Structures are given as C-alpha cells and as structure tokens.
Amino acid sequence: MPYVTVGRENSGDIDLYYEDHGEGQPVVLIHGFPLNGASWEKQIPALLEGGHRVIHYDRRGFGRSSQAAVGYDYDTFAADLKVLMDTLDLREAVLAGFSMGTGEVTRYIATYGSDRVSKAALFGAIPPFLLQTDDNPEGVPGEVFEGFKEAIRKDRPAFYKQFFDDFNNADVFMGNRLSEQAWDQQFSVAIQSSAIATLRCVDTWLTDFRDDLPRLDVPVLVVQGTADRILPIDVTARRLPGLIADLRLVEVEDGPHNIGWTHPEEVNRALVDFIAGDEPTAVGMAKAIVAA
C-alpha cells in the first residue's frame, strides 16, 4: 500500500502510510495514541460491507509512518490530513477519529472547512479542553500530564503497561471483551512507535479546541464509554452538547476508552446508522442522546 509525503526533516521525507479499500462514500479513519490505523480492524469490515470506501493512515511517529522528531501539534496533524485528503481528492467524506484522532477531525474542519467533508464522528473525544485552568475548572490538573511525561522518560514500556490496562479497563473486561492476546497486540504496536512522538504527544492532549468546535458545520457523532479512564466522559463528551451545532451523543454504558475493540457492536451500529442518516438504534448497552 502507498505512502503520501507530508513534509521533510533534515535530509529525509516525512511519509504517512495509508490504506485505501473499497468503493462508495469515503470514510477516513484516524487512530488513537499510541496505536496505528490497523487498530480500526473491528470497524473496517462493517464499513466495507456497508458499501463504503475506507481509508486509514498511521499518524506521523506511529505505525509504519516516518518517525519524525518534529510536527507533534494539531496544526501539523491537521495539515497532514489535508495532504491525504487533497492527494486522494476525497469528496463528501466522513471523518472518524478515535481519541487523539478526534483532535485531527476537529482542527481539520475548523481550519480548512467542510468542502470535502459531509459528516464527522468522534470516538473517545479529546475536545473540548482537557487542561484545568481558571476558565476551565472542569479540566484535569496539569501535574497529571507532567507525571505522564516523567513516566515515559523513565520507562516507556512500563508506562504503556499501565496505560493499556486503563485504556481497556482490563480489570473488568480481560477474559470476556478483551483477550490477553489482544492486549499484547496493542502493546506490541505501541512499543514500535517513536519514543520522541510518545513523549511529545502528551502536550498535544492539552490543546484547547473550544474555538474550533463552533466551526464544525457538519453533523457530528460522538460516542464515549461512561467508564472511560483515559478521557473521562464528564470532562469530554458530555461537555460537547451546546458547543457543536448538530451533535448526536451516544454513551456506551460502562464502556472503557477503547470501545471500538471492547464494544464493536455498539460502535459499529452507531457509526453505520449515522452515516446512513438513520435514527440511533439501541444495541446492547448503548444509550443515544441527540443534542441540538
């Protein structure tokens, strides 16, 4: 599968690995930290079977993309996405992001508009603004993120161990919705990512998207687990109604952050229904809230 060049660092190109499958309305999948595009493996078949063209790519520093030491901010991430969108000349696309990928979706539309985009989907959303400040008391104290960076500097593999336990709520779902082998696969993908990217991405989590959100002028789906330990729902998804004009919020009861893996039936049905323009379908533990 091909690469697209999004920049240069010193003597080398910065290339993004991407895959492009199927036919029909394009759906662009943007993965979460610290995985790669293949982490959408439980969503890709459902989208292909639904008659969609599916494109997914690896963010710079992760997966099979270039492990650059520069460009770890959402303006650059959105610019990378724009190169892919323009190169493939995608039209009427659905942008779907998970975790960190929700930032690319938000910043891309806010910066470049929706000429190429018909809808957007945010799974495990990072907006509106994670950092606790005087005008954002609902956020998370900055020392928490400094602790993450210190843990990464000290022992990145050990950081990943705790991260993926919380990413999946492994103490709850291991042995039923999560196998040891699936956990190991996530760890194996993450450990091959750039150590520099892993560290520098922590600061990107503190991006303030509050000015971006009113610029989202397409229908937006938000899906989040109510037991999300990475991006708690009260700090993220439940704050989005009122900030986005056309929003459908689906809460997955007791779902962890990695709901695309642990609760694919709920996630896939919400996404397929949303793309088709159907009303939310009650599946399993999902609760749909439509907010204007």
Image (cartoon, helix red, strand yellow):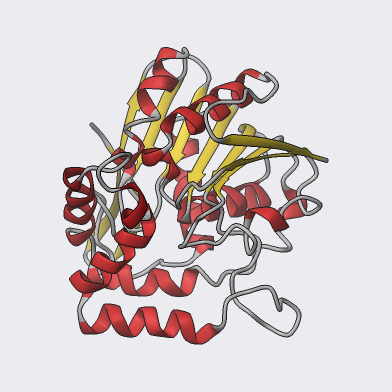
Q: Position of residue 5 (x, y in %)?
A: 33, 48
Q: Position of residue 44 (x, y in %)?
A: 37, 27
Q: Is residue 69 visible?
A: no
Q: Up-down: is 212 above or below 154?
A: above
78 or 97, which is in the foreground?
A: 97
Q: Up-down: is 236 above or below 183?
A: below
The residue located at (44%, 43%) in the rendering is 259
The residue located at (32%, 57%) in the rendering is 171
Q: Quadrant of residue 175?
A: top left
Q: Name the quadrant of the N terminus.
A: top left
172 or 51, which is in the foreground?
A: 172
Q: Up-down: is 200 above or below 181?
A: below
**Tag count:** 0
Q: Position of residue 103 (x, y in %)?
A: 54, 55
Q: Quadrant of residue 281?
A: top right
- For this view, does 69 lie left or right of residue 213? left
The residue located at (29%, 68%) in the rendering is 162
206 or 56, which is in the foreground?
A: 206
Q: Name the quadrant of the C terminus.
A: top right
The residue located at (24%, 61%) in the rendering is 67
- For this view, does 41 lie left or right of residue 179? right
Q: Up-down: is 210 above or below 146?
A: above
Q: Is residue 249 visible?
A: yes
- For this view, does 292 lie left or right of residue 249? right
Q: Position of residue 217 (x, y in %)?
A: 75, 41
